[in-house]
Each structure stands twice: as C-alpha cells, then as structure tokens.
Amino acid sequence: MLNYALRRLLDLLVVLFGVSVLVFLMIRLIPGDAVQILLGANTEVTPEQITELRGKLGLDQPLLTQYAGWLSAALRGNLGQSVWTGAPVSGEILSRLPVTLELTVLPLLLATTLAVPLGMLTAASHNSRLEQVIRFFTIAGITTPAFWLGTLFIYLAFVIAPGWPTIGYVPFRDDPAGHLSRMILPTVALALPMLAGLVRILRSSLLEVLGQDFIRTARSKGLTERSVLYRHALRNAMVPLLTVLGIQAGYLFGGAIVVEQVFAIPGFGRLVVGAINERNYALVQGAILIVTAGFVLINFVVDLLYAVVDPRVEYG
Amino acid sequence: MKFYPAKTFLTAALTLTLLTSAHSAAQTVQRGGTLQLAVDQSPVGLDPHVATAFSTFVVTGQVYEGLLDIDASLKIRPLLASKYTKSADGLRYVFTLRPGVRFHNGDPLSAQDVVFSMDRVKDPKTASPLASRLSSVSDIKATGPLEVTFVLSKPFAPFLSEVATISIVSKKYVEGGGNLQRSAVGTGPFAFKQWVPDTFLELSKNAAYWVKAQPYLDSLKFNIVPDASTRQIGLQSGAYQFLPNIDASVAATLKTAPGVQLLRSQDLAYSLMGVNVSRKPFNDPRVREALNYAINRPELVQGVYFGDAVPAGPLPPALRTYATPVSNFPCYATSAAKARDLLKQAGYPNGVDFSILTFSTIKTVADSAQVLQAQLAKAGFRARVDVQEFGSFVQNWRNSNFDAFVSLNGGSVDPDGHLYRGLISNGSTNVFKFADPVVDKLLEEGRNATSTGSRVRTYAQLQKSLACRGPMQFLAYGTLFSAARSNVKGFTPNPTRSLSTLKTTWLDR
C-alpha cells in the first residue's frame, strides 16, 4: 500500500511537469498576445511601441528562456506576476481558491447525502410508479446544465422573493447571512445535475448487487430487507459510486466555473477565464497547474479509498 | 361633444401634480448614498495613460480629469484649465489652470503635473496608446505655476479634442513609486477606495472636489457581473441601480420593465464591415461599390438594433457641422441587381466567395455579420462568417489577415479622429491596406486646416469619395443606452460614452 502510494505520488509529479509544458505552450500558441489584447482594435500605436511593450513584458525572449525562467521561479514557490497589475499571481490564486472549493464541496455534500437514500429508494421500489417519477426527474436533472438552472433560479428568486440577495459575493467573515443567502442557489444549481447522475448510478449498481448470490444467502438467513440493503448491498454498491464521485468532483469544479459567471461570484473560474482572455500568462499557468494538482490528488485519494470501502481491492 | 367635468378636473389636477413634482424634483437634489453600478468586465489596470479599454475608462473617468472636457452636445468645455488661448498661426496653445485644485492625496495641481502627464504619454517607455494624439506637439512647458504652453510643429485642427482625452496624473505620486495600474490618484469628483478584482471596485466622494457641493453621491460601486441576463435581473430586482452602455437587445427588453428608465444618447461608435483591398476581389473598387449596393442598412437597423440606430455614413450625424446625410450617397439605395451588375463589370459574373471575420463579445457585431451574410447572398456575395475569440480576432485584424471583417469602431468628436488613422496610407489602424493619394491629401488637409469652413469642404469631399468605394462599409450608428432605476436622477448620457455626469447624479430616496 505504501509502495503504491509513493509510486502514484511520483506519477503525479510527472503529470504536473507535462501539464506545465503544455499549458505554457498552449496559451502562447493561441493567436493574440498580451500586447495585442491590451491595445485591442481601433487604437493608434506604432510598431516601435508594440516592440517596446513586448520587451517590457518579457515576451521578446525565446520560449525556452521564458519557460525555464518561469519553472525555476515556480519551484521556489514564485508563480510570477500578473501582466497587468504587477501583483503576485499566487496571492490572487489563493484568494480565489476557497470560493470555488466551497462551490465544489457544498454541492458534493448535498448531492451525496441525498443520493444515497434516493438511490436506495429507487432500487427498493424497482418497477413501481415511484421509481418512474424519480427516473423522470433524474433524466431531466442529468440533461439540464447547471448554468441554465442558475439563470432560472435567479429569475425565480426575483419573482418569488425580490428582496432576497442572490447575485454577487460577500465573504463569510464579513456577513455570514449574506454569504449563505448568496450561496444557496449556486449550490443547488450545481448539486441537482450531479444528484441525478449519482441516483442513476447507485440504483443500477444496487440492483446488480441485489441480484447476486450472497444477497440471496443473506435473505435466506432471515435478515430484514432493511438490513440486507444497508449492511450488505450498499457497501458493495459504493465502489462504482466512488469512482463516479471522483470524476464528478472534477466536473463540479468545471461547472462551478460557469456558475460563477452567472452568479457573479469571484471564484477560480472567473479568474482563469479572465486571465485567458487577457493573455495574462503567469496567471493562467499558475492557476491551471494548481487545478491539475487538485485533480490528480482527488483521483489518488479515490484510489486509496477503494481499499477502505472494499477489502477485496489490494494494491501491489 | 360631451363634457366630463370630473374627468377634466382630475386630468388637470394630475397634470399639475406631475408638473410640480417634476419641477420640485429638478430643484431638490438629495445628497448621499451609494450608486450600485453593474459592469461586465474588470478593468485591465487603472493607469489612464496605458489601459484605454472601456472597462478601465468607466472608472478612471471618475477619478481623473483632463484639461478640457467634452459635454453631451460634443462641445469642448474647460475642466482643469479654466481657459486657453490659441496663437493666430495655430501653433501655440496656452492653458491657464484652475487655481485651488487638489489631488486626492492633498497635493495641489500645478503646471508641472500637466507637463509630466503629457511627457509620460509621449514617452515610448510608457507605451501609451494615446501617444499619437500628441504627435503634432513638439514642445510642452510650464510657463507659470498655473500655466502650460504647448508648441505644435504644424497646425492641428483636432488638437483640443485630443488633449481633452488625456488625464492629468500626480507627478509626485508617480515619481514617488505609486503604481497607477493598481491604485489611482487624480483630481476627479470620486477617489479610489478599493478594488477586489472580478468582484467590485469602489470609489468614494472627493470631499475636497473643486466644484463646490459636488459630487452628490457618497460613493460609486462598480459591481463586476459578467453575465448580461444577471445584470438585467439585478437591475430589475433593485440589486443594481445603473447599467452603463447596454446592448440594444437588452435595452429592448428593459423598455417596459417597471421601475427602470432608459437613458439614451446618440452613439459616436459605429458598426462597420471592412475589406482587405490587397486581396481579390476587394482590390477592385467596383466590387466595394457592389457591397454597398447589396447592403440594406434600414433592414440591419431593424434586425440588429430594433430600430434604435441610424444608417451610417463615414461621419456620425452627431458631428452636425461635418456629416453628409446618407441620402446623398447613391450606393446607399439598396439594389441587388445593381450590385450584380457591378460584380459582372468587375469580372465576377458568377459572384464571389469570401469570409467575414468577426467576434462574439459584442452582440450587435455578431448579429450584424449574420444579417450581412444573408443580405449579401442576394447579390452574389457568398460569405462565410468566421466568429473568433476576441484575442484571435485582434491579431488577425492587426495583421490584415482577413478578406473582410465586421466590427465596432469607437468614435471621436472630431472628423479627423474618425477617418485619419484608419485610411491614411500606412496609418496605424489602416488594416485595409488602403492607399489612395487623393484621400491622403484630403485627410492631411482636414487636420491641418485652420478654418472650420475649409474643413467642412474637405470632409464633404472625403465622405463622397469614401462612402461607396472606400475600404469600409459603414453600417450603423446605434443609440447609446444606459439603464437606471427610476429614482436615479441627474445623469446625462454622453455620445463619447463618458460617465462624467455621475458627479451630478443623485438618488431620490
């Protein structure tokens, strides 16, 4: 187990290095550099001024020099400065990360806590009217994007409770009530599509487990249906759910980015989208590197969790 | 005819009440309060000499002031300079600064700050996009504690309107290491308070503002809300009170919204299609003329601007002294047959294929490209619309890497600003690769003329030669809309998109 964990950690470093190279190249390969964006269309500048500005931003150096400079600084914990304001990039990233993490963790918690009972309910009520109703809502939920739900919620909130603050962001420590009232709608918008997906998966995985021999054995021992479901079936049905949770957490992070746009929440997504649009190189690189690290770590944790949930899983 | 005494009385009473309330509202300004604005983008830095994007300008326009101001009727008015004199040969301008003006850090404004600001804009190290506005200036010096003299190398008619766009920054603050991109110290009605990127930017009232008793509001909060429908619902629900410069389609939906007023003004900015005259088929002036015949501007005004726009000629109707009415241009009478005929004459009897480069961040721009595609098809122009991300668009645009493009050009209060840099041979925004000796001569004449009469004649000639066969197909001047809650008073929209009248804006509570 320890060996496995160490090997995976090493893999993680290789992945991060590869990603840093890719991101570095990609942001520079898309047409339009920082200088072009700054000047935009319809401004009057001479080619000399463009050259001057490019030199000032260090964009006239060969790519390899730029990359080496960035990497060696990054290894020392310095992710560089924002092209526009000169502020350190790491500060901006760190100030945004908690907002998006909150928008990932809250929906994740909400969706999983609801998914387990709902999934069991659908599995237990197999082929009933209730199951059809739940199925209808889960399919609708899976196919409805969170950002659309977000816009719909803002509009509905405005119609039902016009005074309710739904847009924007205030830090929790400044105004806890204001913070939470603004977080409810985006959290629900993100949780619903995820909940729908989880219920479907849990249902099919439960049905599969319930059809297996050891369940029949448990039933024949005279255990109650409740005990069969909770103590035997659920635990075995959790493995596929965990895999999906790991992937969904990543999707949530992506979904949070779009939802931030709709609710005007200054999270990580807004930061990255803005940085790409402005070709704010250091910021894009630093931000994507941190997201990748997060992704790889989540997957790593999920892999380790398999062993906890299902003792049959062994790592060599 | 029947007579309804009760109704008449009621009407009279109501009218009277309305009149008196409107009257008293105009009289009693209420002070204090925060105006919650919603804008789509975070500023790209706050340096008024470097970052000239609109997202920066809405903020810096409140913090900084220039020597002169341009009011809503496009007249040039004194601002930090209380007066100026111009020498008879048009080569020397002397500005007298208003006494008793202070920067937000308490330092008094002096002639040195003006010289410093102008030099900073001219300095290539600043890389200011505004530098060319001072290209005609050969020397700037302080000729007194409150007097600045500009010496021009040759007469330059748009000089005053160009100087009006340059903000005066504090010399002491910048030389003392102040970073203008992250903070701001100006003389304007509002002072920089705090900026949380992508969240909001707050300005607070400059209590020592040189105009007595202004501004009326305690603070301005620019909430950064990227999603258009969120801004709209936010205004309707009262979370925001002011949306500056909104899109025509948003304005159309807000027209009937209760509690919301639309403030409108003519826009100096115009939508246009531009063609690359170094590429076939647009190297042929007959093909460019055919484009104009194929375009149906009134239809475009309806379809894209919901009727709130006017068909565009080379100069905006807001420049009343100079603009030629579009009815004078024969090619503005839409005729697919005429267009096909011209294409045939140019050697394209089977029509032409080309692509239109555009971007999606401004809705009217992307919509215009779509409408044009359909209109042009009727005349044998088979266009492919290529919608790109804005950064890619700018790069291809700057490198003239297009057959044609559709975009929005910011306007200017002087005809020179509208036409010169885009049309002069090798001009800084002449991405069309257009070079025409006659046009060049007229453009130079226009900017160096010393009398308004001769300028009017020059620009009339220019408009005539550009409207049908030039490299730009001028499409429409839109209406500039701002939306506000109905209790927002005292704001006058400005065709330049300046929000300078926020200093006389107040909230009726």
Image (cartoon, coloured by chain):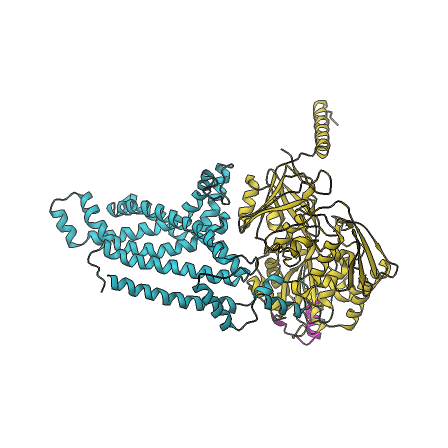
Quadrant assignment, res B311:
bottom right
Q: Position of residue A58 (x, y in %)?
A: 56, 67
**Image point (66%, 54%), residue name:** B301
Colour in which chain B is drawn: yellow
Which residue ends up furthest to the bottom in the rendered image? B347
Check if residue B344 falls in the magenta segment. yes
State the image quarter where residue B284 is shown.
Answer: bottom right
Q: Nearer the viewer, residue B68 or B311?
A: B68
Residue drawn 49% across the image and 68% down it: A69
Magenta region, residue range:
B338-354
Quadrant holding the C terminus of chain B? top right
Comparing A113 with B188, the one in front is B188
Q: Is residue A224 magenta?
A: no
Q: Is residue B311 above or below residue A227?
A: below
Q: Residue furthest front?
A: B176
| Residue toward you, B362 or A100 | A100
Q: Is residue B88 left or right of residue B113?
A: right
Q: Is residue B87 above or below residue A30?
A: above
Pick the quarter of the image with the N terminus of chain B: top right
Q: Which chain is cyan?
A: A
* Residue B104 % position (x, y): 66, 46
**Residue B390 visible in the picture:** yes
Q: Kindly tell me whether residue B386 is visible in this rendering.
A: no
In the rendered view, does A302 fall on the left or right side of B502?
left
Q: Position of residue B491 (x, y in %)?
A: 68, 42
